[in-house]
Amino acid sequence: MKPEFRDKSIRSFVVRGGRLTEGQRRAFELAWPRYGLKLDDGLLDIDACFGGSEALVVEVGFGMGDSLLAMAAAAPEQSFVGIEVHPPGVGRLINEANQRDLNNLKVYMADANDVLAECFDDGSIDRFQLYFPDPWHKKKHNKRRIVQRQFLQLITAKLKPGGVLHMATDWQPYAEQMLELLTAAPGLINSSDGDYCPRPDYRPETKFERRGERLGHGVWDLIFTKL
């Protein structure tokens, strides 16, 4: 399987190399037919894909999939869709999901902009998650960050009224930019009385996050609700 791309515009993520382990390679052979979704499948039929569920949760950039796997396992009554372009991460996630026999998880290996625009109805997502996206530290690279006005407009359209947009980052300048853009975004309201929210129970704390906390690094959670 190769990541799918529709055009040559700035992508939501950069495809990084990385060898597949034998287990990840087998996962694409054995588990992809069960968990994989494609852009060419068109608009996602949520009921046919998952049956009845309490909520649809969509996560972009799940990395190696640990958090998304934990959330899906902890909430079998909810439906989870992950979007990622890194093949080793996709392979690892679907391999683990298959071993646990999870029935509430699907995966796209394609660019998030394309998937959101082509595969989800407006007003169909209950919670959108973006955790620890690439901060593109250098100022000249800030324009490559996924969190931009156009991306927020796309997410807002796909959220149900009352749906939640949840982002987290460990890079304070990026958190500040996220907060500025989210606050200015039409149709969204901050769920916090201040600027940032405590980490909600449903978001697992990652090993990377715990290590950062020991070193005194901060983590900023932003949770906004669609009006």
Image (spheres, rainbow, N blue to C red):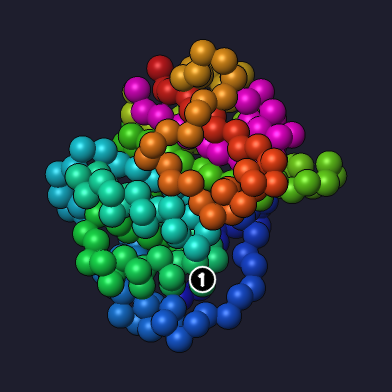
Q: Quadrant of the N terminus?
A: bottom left
Q: At which x and y percent is residue 158?
A: 40, 35
| Numbered range of the magenta stretch | 162-180
Q: Nearer the viewer, residue 3 or 99?
A: 99
Vertical relation: 12 (above or below) 166: below
Q: Residue furthest top?
A: 193
72 on left or right of 89: left
- Residue 13 vs residue 191, the one in the foreground: 191
Q: Position of residue 75 (x, y in %)?
A: 26, 46
Residue 31 picture location, percent across and down = 31, 74
Report the residue marked by disc 1.
87
Toward the bottom, the furthest residue is 22
Q: Position of residue 3 (x, y in %)?
A: 52, 67
Image: 63 above or below 148? below
The stretch drawn in magenta includes residue 26: no
Tell me which amino acid carries mark 1.
Pro
How many C-alpha atoms fall within 10 Å of the one at disc 1: few (<14), some, or many (≥20)?
many
Residue in the image at 45% along x and 86% along y: 22
Residue at 40% in and 65% down: 93
Residue that protrudes farthest toward the left in the picture: 52
The residue shown at (37%, 78%) is: 27
Tell me if I can see residue 42 in this picture.
no
Residue drawn at x 50%, y 18% is 192
Dividing the image into 4 quarters, which one contains the C terminus?
top left
